Amino acid sequence: MPETPAVESPDLATLAALFYPAPVGGGLPAALGRFERVEEESLPADARGLLAHHSHMTVAMERFHASPVDVEVLDRRTDGKHYSRKIRLRTQRGGRVVQFGIVRLNLDYLAPDVREEVVSERTPLGRVLINHGVLMQVRLTALWRIEPGPDLCRSFELAEPTVIYGRTAMIDFETSPAIELLEISAPLAPTK
């Protein structure tokens, strides 16, 4: 098993710094946006149902949008044992961008065939883990209200910024935190 020290909760600034220059003085890059940690009760109902759970977002997105999703890898990096990628998920039906994300995973936790499929970048991470029957626990760590910056607006194909919501989560293998996640939902149309 890996000897890398366990990360109990993803650090938003650390995940962002994988793909964005860190601002002078710390914090989150303006290109990503302004993040405010919120409690589950303050989320709109649809966002709460989509984000406030301990399950894979791939499954939640497919169920909510009634369509399988494809992954688009916008950027990636490998640092020693860690593979990270910045992605968006797009529905197969209609081609709508429904999620932006940053993931950092310790490759030592994955069997060679699972690792190969993950780094091939053809299938969303959650779907790979589920299809291979990898035993893991998704652990929600925080919910976020986000005023998207220019890069998030481009990623979601937004004409203008609108408040969106996201979450940070960990995926634990047995009792070891192995995958850090930032998962942001595209703007949701209010339910009627």
Image (cartoon, rainbow, N blue to C red):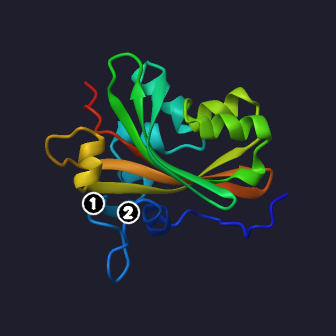
Quick check: marks 1 and 2 in contact, CB under 8 Å? yes
Q: Residue at x 61, y 30 (%)?
A: 127
In the picture, measured across the screen, residue 27 lies left or right of residue 10, that is left
Q: Is residue 94 left or right of residue 167?
A: left
User: Element under label 1?
Assistant: loop
Residue 134 is at least partly visible in this image: no
Identify the mark at residue 20; answer none if there is no mark: 2
- Count of marks overlaid on the render: 2
Disc sitting over residue 31 in the figure: 1
- Residue 21 visible to an observer of this rendering: yes
* Residue 90 picture location, percent across and down: 39, 29
Q: As displayed, is residue 67 above or below residue 112?
A: above
Q: Could you tell whether 36 is left or right of 117 in the image?
A: left
- Residue shown at 38%/72% (left/top)? 22
**Among the 4 quarters of the image, the one containing residue 44:** top left
Marks 1 and 2, the one that precedes in the sequence:
2
SS class, disc 2: loop
In the displayed image of the protein, which residue is found farthest to the right? 1
**Mark 1 vs mark 2, CA separation in Å:** 8 Å
Which quadrant, please, contains the N terminus? bottom right
Near mark 2 (Cα within 10 A), the count class, few <14, some 14-19 or many ≥20, is: some
Which residue is depicted at the point 24% across and 38% down?
Answer: 157
View extreme (left): residue: 160
Q: Residue 147 vs residue 21: left or right?
A: left
* Kind of residue at badge 1: Ala
